[in-house]
Image (cartoon, rainbow, N blue to C red):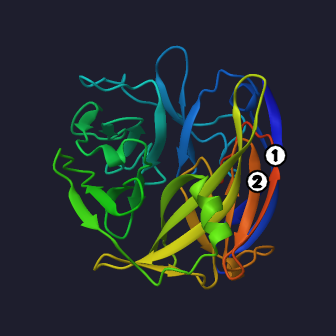
């Protein structure tokens, strides 16, 4: 059974000009049904990762605007292996090193679980049968963080809680001894007492975002505050502040209100950036965010937050896709 997902904007990378095309996308109803049995566990590179009752984790391209409606791709992955004193029931997010995991032999899938376990797999590896390489992270500051793939560094990277430390893992030789980078925060803004008090009441999350068009890396800190507790005991949260830091190779994290022509997208997918001038309808120097219970954006120059309650069972931004 399927349904039409709301109109998607396919950001095409075809030559000679970049184009923006509105499309309708048909997806299986089970992927967007608004109930408690969520089967999507993450998204990256135009792929969603699902984990159904059969216990099989799959990569699927159902949300990719240019993928086939009638013959979507399904890539089954090996059964998950739980390390001692770890858990694999609650998954933080998924990251892929390539947008072609079905035929790219070098593509690596990384899954970050809540807690110390981090797992890697090569779905299309021809030299051996796909299997998981499981890492136990010792430092608890990474336990609730999200993993991302840096194309510039060719590494999987995870920001620690607070953003002061970044761990990097080689996708082809993952080990229990990652490379660490300690950040030094600079150019910090002077906050009003009211703004500081508000941020102290918020739940903070850190997102590493790589701008592939410019080669820049940003650390985005998002501050969300509980505005309502539902009868079911679920906290409804709203973004109240957002801070962006530009990172350099020396470990400096410089606060900025100017990311140039870029638009940053935060959702349950791996975050990404696009140049606003390449895609009609986008405005530069903003961060757009999309979650299960809110949607909005932040104008970095003014630091003003525009947010609205928005119930969505599939809050996934899909990065630009090549339509040729």
Taking depth in this image into account, of 50 and 227 the one nearest to the observer is 227
Quadrant location, the N terminus: top right
At mark 1, the secondary structure is loop
**Front-lying residue, 199 or 244:** 199
Q: Please state the horizontal and vertical placement of residue 30, each as a whole percent of the image.
A: 71, 25
Q: Is residue 40 left or right of residue 281?
A: left
Query: Is residue 6 positioned above or below 114 on the image?
Result: below
Q: Could you tell which of marks 1 and 2 lies nearer the N-terminus?
A: 2
Q: Position of residue 169 (x, y in %)?
A: 26, 53
The disc label shown at residue 310, or none:
1
Taking the view exactly as shown, the residue that stands out farthest to the front is: 193
* Residue found at x 68% / y 68%: 194
Quadrant of image for the C terminus = bottom right
Q: How many marks?
A: 2
Q: Is residue 211 above or below residue 79?
A: below
Where does label 2 land, which residue? 295
Instruction: Tell whether label 2 touches label 1 (CB within 8 Å).
Output: yes
**Residue 104 shows in this picture:** yes
Residue 118 quadrant:
top left
Q: Residue at x 46, y 43 (%)?
A: 94
Compared with 161, 25 (above or below) is above
């Amino acid at each position: 059974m399927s349904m039409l997902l709301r109109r998607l904007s396919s950001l095409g990378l075809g030559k000679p000009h970049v184009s923006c095309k509105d499309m309708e996308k048909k997806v299986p109803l089970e992927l967007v049904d608004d109930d408690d049995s969520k089967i999507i566990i993450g998204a990256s590179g135009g792929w969603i990762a699902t984990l159904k009752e059969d216990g099989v984790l799959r990569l699927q391209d159902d949300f990719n605007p240019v993928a086939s409606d009638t013959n979507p791709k399904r890539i089954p992955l090996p059964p998950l292996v739980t390390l001692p004193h770890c858990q694999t029931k609650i998954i933080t997010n998924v990251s892929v090193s390539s947008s072609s995991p079905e035929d790219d032999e070098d593509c690596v899938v990384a899954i970050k679980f809540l807690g110390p376990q981090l797992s890697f797999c090569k779905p299309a590896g021809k030299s051996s049968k796909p299997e998981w390489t499981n890492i136990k992270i010792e430092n608890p500051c990474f336990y609730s963080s999200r993993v991302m793939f840096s194309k510039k560094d060719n590494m999987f990277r995870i920001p620690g809680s607070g953003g002061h430390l970044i761990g990097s893992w080689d996708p082809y030789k993952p080990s229990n001894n990652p490379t660490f980078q300690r950040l030094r925060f600079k150019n910090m803004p002077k906050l009003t007492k009211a703004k500081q008090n508000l941020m102290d009441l918020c739940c903070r999350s850190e997102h590493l975002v790589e701008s592939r068009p410019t080669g820049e890396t940003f650390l985005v800190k998002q501050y969300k505050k509980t505005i309502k507790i539902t009868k079911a005991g679920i906290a409804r949260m709203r973004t109240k502040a957002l801070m962006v830091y530009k990172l350099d190779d020396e470990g400096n994290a410089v606060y900025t209100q100017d990311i140039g022509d870029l638009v940053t997208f935060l959702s349950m997918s791996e975050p990404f950036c696009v140049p606003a001038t390449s895609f009609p309808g986008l405005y530069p120097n903003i961060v757009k965010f999309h979650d299960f219970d809110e949607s909005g954006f932040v104008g970095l120059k003014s630091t003003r937050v525009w947010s609205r309650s928005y119930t969505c069972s599939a809050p996934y931004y899909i990065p630009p896709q090549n339509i040729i």
